Structure formats: structure tokens, C-alpha cells
Image (tube, coloured by chain):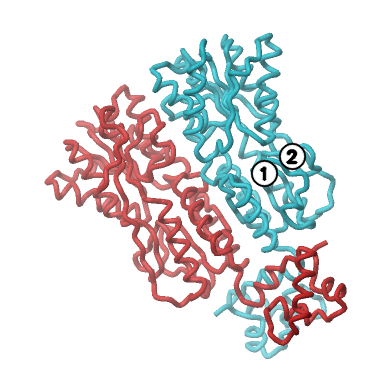
Chain colours: A cyan, B red
């Protein structure tokens, strides 16, 4: 059984109210009594009940996080970094996965809100989100992560995905590629903005924007490798075929590389491929993968800081934090000779 | 502001006690009043306060999970499967990472217990754990996952790691390898048992157990690739060098393959390598990786079921659940011709 306040009171022959006052740091308890109570709490390894404490303060000291897929390296790295930073402030992370399903996402958000998190962080898979309170209550502060909603005035942390798209595409252009395709996602701000960045870079280089070279799909996270493979097969049917591809994320890039190799072509000689995310094992892949690194660890750290600020001051000014991405060039774009040279953009 | 019971009471001109009785399903409220209260709750989208509810029932409807590394594919897959299964019972997952540090693990466990989880699931990185209550309280039921402690009578879910070691080693023996090394971990039941399985298989085949061929390290999770690389370099200095290696997990196997290739040797022709875990992208690696699949999704599902049982009946009989592993043979052991043929053990 857990030690309760009344056990301590009984042991010392004093009232529960006095013990409770000591616990709350109330000053109208004599020094001698206070010392006896603290000594006994230590002896019995007394742990205050956080539920009761939360009820009194209205805080739960938990942060909720909803991501599309827990195993996806980008979201796993983010959750790890976030949880490590929250640990320093004695806060815990309540984690939920939406499985890229908008309906499951709404359920998970409701569950977290009913449970009472101090702040909610969401990489939402909703196609449209005009009013966040469609999803939840109207008092828990929330922070959008990775996916922003242009018409929603909300706290946001992520990368500038236009820059991500420009950086990846410019890298392919700098390598002399001229027929550059994009394997993209749908209905999310990174999807729209990476595509915009891709088009910006082509325009800046005076390259034509051939709409046949842009293919997009939904659900590019968990089964991204299979989706990337299928879309690359489609692109390889084009005449002339693309000589480079900027993929929405690393998982679609892994699938795209597989499709190129299966077609008997070479990466990067015939088709150069770049992803986004820079997953932990990118260097160990069949063709070590070039990628835009989103600085996921920094994203997690900063998200934790914003979450703590929001928990303490829910009505603070809206924050929009963009972490700068960087290019990591490996064999899938620059070939074997220059492999694994991280280039700063 | 959130809708409170007293808002509903005021709107309907009845007492808060009556509203509360309706919420708790108390029968001494007239049908007409009950209907009015429920209608108003729906109109206002009233969400019961889970904190208050938890305080009344003594339950939090949360399960705590502590793993060594959130990004490690094995633990991420487990957490994903566990959280999906818990969702069905309206329970949430509180997730913490110990960063493979026994001191952080103890902090995280204490934080979760103080917060009040109904059940704790732990893949512990403690070297010795004779009494779980050294770590926490003595009332929260807990379930050890992946790592068992022989001298502790506790609920456990994982694989039979002796079988894992035997299966991996026998696969290498069946391929005609005779000088089989083991890159292992330390101080954990999977470490000891996989090593035992490795020795059993060698003995059963009449192969000598050369102690030079067994190398072990701590902290084989997060930086497993670097550790595996370093240990493989050591093994390659032996004369004669090993012709096969059973690695503790997939990450050490990835590093070991890298070391073999860096030495100008071939996988599997010169050195066959098998890992354990069967990570999501194993087929896309430089040398597609053979591995013992731990059936992580099933582990997560069954762990959720046990957690719910423990939450409802903390004093139930101790459970020890072993999920059967299976062999997945890819290029790193069987070469290109027979790649990606899953073999059931």
C-alpha cells in the first residue's frame, strides 16, 4: 500500500491537516514538527499523489503528442528529443499515433484532452482544419508541429518547407540535372510548400515546369517505401524519363531508389534521388541517401520549450518557429566519390 | 473555458449534486431531469474531467512505458502496436525513454508512478534488479518487457531469447559456416540468453566454442551501428577470421556489415551476418539484412492485453508470455539468389 498523509500523522501523533500543511510549505507549523514530518516522509518514501496535486493546481504536468506514425524515423526522433527536454522540467509525454487516419486522430485528441494535458502538440493529418476546436476543447493550448494550417491562427513549429523544396531541387540542378521530377504528398502544408519550393527552384534556373513530372499521393508515411516505389515506376514510363527526383520524405525516396534499381538503371548516374528527413540509417542504405535534414532534435527541443511556456502562460502571443533545414549529400545524388560529405546550405 | 457541472446546473435551474448524480448514473434522479441534463451536456459538448474521475476511481486509464531508446525500430514498433491496442480500451500510453541509462530509467519510473499510471511496462536497462520496488512504489502492477530478471518474480512478456540465439546460429551452421562469432550485449536477459542459444547451437552441431569469437559491449541500442562496427573490426583481426556472425540486434548487424565491406570483404561470401529484430527497412539496406523477427507487433498487442488485465486485477497470477520468433533470411546470409525468402523456423 502507498503511504498516505494520515499514516504519517498517526505515526507522529499529530493531525493530518498539520502534515498536509508541511507538504504544501505552509508557514504556520513549528520548525520541530516540520522536521519530524519531513523525516518520517523520507523514512516511509512518501510520494505525493500527482492526481490530487493536479486537481488542486489544474495542471497535469503532461504534454500530449499526436503524430501520424510512431515508427517513422522523423516522428520517433522528434518524440525522443521532446521527451528528453520535458524530462528536465518534470513533465511527462502522453503519446498517440493517428495511423495517418483523420478519424483516429480526432479520437486520440479527444482522449488526450479529456485526460487533461497541459498542452497538445499535433502533427495533424487532417486535410482541412479551419478551427482547431472542432477537434477538442477551447482551453487547452496547442502547438501545431510539422504541418501548418494557413487559415488557422495557431502556434507552429516546423521547417520552412518552401526552403526545403528549393534546397533539394537546387542541389539536383547544381549537379547538372535538367529533367527533375517530384514525388509528393497531398493535403498538408509540407506537401504544398515543398512542391512550391521545387517549382521556385526550377523557375529560378530557367527550367520548364513539366506537370507530368509531379506525382502525388496520400499516406506517404507508414508505407512510404511502397508508395515511392509505385510512383517511381510511373515516372520511369515517361519519355524522356526524369534524370532526378526530389522525394517528399526519406521513406518514399527509399522506395523510389528500389524502383530505379529494379528497372536496371543506376542511382545516381541515370536518376539522382534526394529525400527529406535524413533518417538515422540513411548512410547504410543500398544507395546511401541524400536528404534535407530537418534538424529533428532541435525541433523536439524547441517544441518542449514552447510547450512549457504555453503550459505556464496559455494566453501568450502566438509563436511561429521555423528551424533551418540543411542539405546532407550522399551517394544517391553525388555518387560514390563524394559520398557522405555533409554540405551546409 | 471548459463547461463545468455547475454551468449545466445553473442553466437548468437544478442543483450541481443532481447533475453529478446523472453523470455517475445514479438512479435517484427522475427520467425527465436526467433527459434534460444529458441534452444540455450534449449541447455544451461537456467533457468529464478525467483527473477528477481518476481520483474517485483510483484509476488513471493510462499505461506507462519505459524503453531504452524511442527511435530504435524494435521499441518504436512495440510502442506503436501497444498504443494502438490500448486505444481500443480508451487507455492512453505515457511514454518515457531511459536513454539506456539506469539512473534516468529510475527517474522516469518514479515520475510515472507519482503521476499515477495503472500499469507500468518496462524494458529495463538495470544491470541487476532484485526487487522492483527499489525503483518505485509497491502497489502499481508492472510488466517487464524484453528484458527479464531471473531472481525477480514478475510479469514478463518477450521472446525466448535462448531460442532466438539457437535459431540464428543454426541458420548459419545450416549454410555450412563453421567459424561463427557472436557480437553480444551485457547485463540483460536477452544478452545472456542469446549467448546461451548461440553456444547450444554450436554444441549441438559439434562445433568448438572458441571464446575469442564472442565479443560483448554495453549500450548496443542507440549507437548500435558504431558499436557493431568496432566489434566487427576486432573480430576481423582474428586468425583465422570468422566466416559468420550472429549479432545481438539489427543495429549492431548494420555496423558489422559496414566493417566487413570497409575491410574489402564480401557479405555473405566471406562473412555471413544475421541480426535480430527485423527492422522495417532491413530489405533496403546496402546488404539486405537477415534477422530473427521478434514479432514485435504481436508483442505490443499481447502486452496491451496483459496491461489491461493487470489494471483491472492487480493481484492476478504472474504471467510469463513468450512470443515465438521466426527467421527471415535475406542477402546478408543467403546471398543474392535466395534473397527475401522468409523461412519459418
**Image spot of residue A27 (x, y percent):** 81, 76
Name which quarter of the figure residue B240 lies in.
Answer: top left
**Can the viewer see residue B15?**
yes
Callout count = 2
User: Which residue, as the protein is rendered here, is positioned at the far left?
Assistant: B206
Callout 2 crowding tier (Cα within 10 Å): few <14, some 14–19, many ≥20: some
Name which quarter of the figure residue B161 lies in.
Answer: bottom left
Looking at the rendered structure, the secondary structure element under dot 2 is loop
Horizontal relation, residue B169 to residue B69: left or right: left
Quadrant (top left, top right, bottom left, bottom right) of the N terminus of chain A: bottom right
Name which quarter of the figure residue B178 lies in.
Answer: top left
Provide the residue designation for mark 1: A126
User: Which residue, as the protein is rendered here, is positioned at the far bottom?
Assistant: A13
Horizontal relation, residue A159 to residue B274: left or right: right
**Image spot of residue A233 (x, y percent):** 47, 23
Callout 1 crowding tier (Cα within 10 Å): few <14, some 14–19, many ≥20: some
In the drawing, what numbered circle is on residue A149? 2
**Residue located 18% across and 40% down the image:** B174
**Residue located 60% across and 72% down the image:** B59
Labels 2, 1: one chain: yes
Disc 2 and disc 1 in contact, CB within 8 angstroms = yes
| The one of B139 and A315 positioned closer to us in this rendering | A315
**Residue located 38% across and 58% down the image:** B158
**Can the viewer see residue A90?**
no
Q: Which subunit holds the residue at mark 2?
A: A
| The one of A117 and A84 positioned closer to us in this rendering | A117
Looking at the rendered structure, the secondary structure element under dot 1 is loop
Note whether B186 is above or below B231 in the view shown.
Answer: below
**Image spot of residue B248 (x, y percent):** 34, 45
Amino acid at each position: 500500500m502507498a503511504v498516505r498523509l494520515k499514516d504519517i500523522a498517526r505515526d507522529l501523533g499529530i493531525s493530518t491537516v498539520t502534515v498536509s500543511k508541511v507538504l504544501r510549505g505552509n508557514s504556520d507549523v513549528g520548525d520541530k514538527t516540520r522536521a519530524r514530518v519531513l523525516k518520517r516522509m523520507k523514512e516511509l518514501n512518501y510520494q505525493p499523489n500527482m492526481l490530487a496535486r493536479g486537481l488542486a493546481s489544474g495542471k497535469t504536468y503532461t504534454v500530449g503528442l499526436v503524430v501520424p506514425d510512431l515508427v517513422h524515423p522523423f516522428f520517433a526522433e522528434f518524440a525522443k528529443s521532446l521527451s528528453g527536454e520535458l524530462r528536465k522540467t518534470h513533465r511527462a509525454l502522453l503519446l498517440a499515433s493517428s495511423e495517418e487516419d483523420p478519424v483516429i486522430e480526432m479520437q486520440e485528441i479527444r482522449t488526450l484532452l479529456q485526460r487533461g494535458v497541459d498542452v497538445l502538440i499535433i502533427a495533424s493529418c487532417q486535410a482541412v482544419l479551419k478551427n482547431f476546436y472542432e477537434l477538442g476543447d477551447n482551453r487547452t493550448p496547442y502547438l501545431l508541429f510539422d504541418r501548418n494550417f494557413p487559415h488557422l491562427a495557431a502556434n507552429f513549429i516546423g521547417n520552412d518547407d518552401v526552403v526545403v523544396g528549393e534546397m533539394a531541387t537546387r542541389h539536383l540542378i547544381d549537379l547538372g540535372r535538367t529533367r527533375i521530377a517530384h514525388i509528393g504528398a497531398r493535403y498538408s502544408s509540407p506537401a504544398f510548400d515543398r512542391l512550391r519550393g521545387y517549382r521556385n527552384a526550377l523557375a529560378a534556373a530557367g527550367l520548364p515546369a513539366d506537370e507530368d513530372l509531379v506525382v502525388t499521393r496520400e499516406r506517404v508515411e507508414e508505407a512510404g517505401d511502397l508508395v515511392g516505389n509505385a510512383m517511381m515506376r510511373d515516372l520511369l514510363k515517361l519519355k524522356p524519363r526524369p534524370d532526378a527526383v526530389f522525394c517528399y520524405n526519406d521513406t518514399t525516396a527509399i522506395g523510389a531508389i528500389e524502383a530505379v534499381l529494379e528497372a536496371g538503371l543506376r542511382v545516381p548516374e541515370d536518376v539522382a534521388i534526394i529525400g527529406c528527413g535524413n533518417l538515422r540509417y540513411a548512410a547504410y542504405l543500398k544507395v546511401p541517401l541524400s536528404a534535407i535534414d530537418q534538424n529533428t532534435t532541435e525541433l523536439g527541443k524547441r517544441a518542449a520549450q514552447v510547450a512549457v511556456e504555453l503550459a505556464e502562460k496559455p494566453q501568450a502571443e502566438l509563436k511561429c518557429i521555423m528551424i533551418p533545414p540543411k542539405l546532407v549529400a550522399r551517394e544517391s545524388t553525388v555518387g560514390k566519390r563524394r559520398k557522405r560529405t555533409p554540405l551546409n546550405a
